[in-house]
Amino acid sequence: MTRVLVVDDNADSAESLSLLVELMGHAVRTAHDGEQALVEAEAFRPEIVLMDIGMPRMDGYEAARRLRTMPWAATIVLVALTGWGQDEDRRRSEEAGFDHHLIKPVDPAAPEALLGPPRP
């Protein structure tokens, strides 16, 4: 079972995406800002993080940069979820350490393609 952390300050979006990921057979936790994401990630050790960029307290860029400094997080897959899709936005997410950049609203097939089948 793949461990997935969903991070979004919009509680409805976080809940919807978490439910979708859970229905695909993965273990899910949620956080609603970058600071909470770091705490949840440290405890849960996700293999994949689906994270909004525009959040209060700590945005997704900073949370991604901080995650990338944690030795255990070197191999996690970071996926930016954002309404920002210009070339500059994609460049910034890549520089922050994101592996993928998905534009909201996210097509339900996109997380499935990234996550694949649950791991045992």
Image: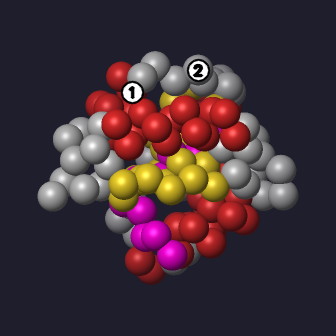
Residue 22 in sight in this render: yes
Residue extent of the magenta highlight? 43-52
| Colour scheme employed for the rendering of this structure | secondary structure
Query: Which residue is the extreme one toward the right?
Result: 57
Q: Is residue 58 magenta?
A: no
Quick check: 12 above or below 62?
Answer: above
Q: What amino acid type is highlighted by mark number 1? A: Ala
Count of marks, rendered view: 2
Report the residue at 57% width, 53% height from top: 30
**Residue 104 located left or right of residue 54:** left
Q: Does the magenta stretch include residue 44?
A: yes
Which residue is disc 1 drawn over?
110
The disc, 1 or 2, on the residue closer to the chain's N-terminal end is 2
Report the residue at 62% width, 68% height from top: 38
Q: Position of residue 105 (x, y in %)?
A: 58, 20
Q: Quadrant of the N terminus?
A: bottom left
Report the residue at 51% width, 76% height from top: 43
Which residue is disc 2 drawn over?
105
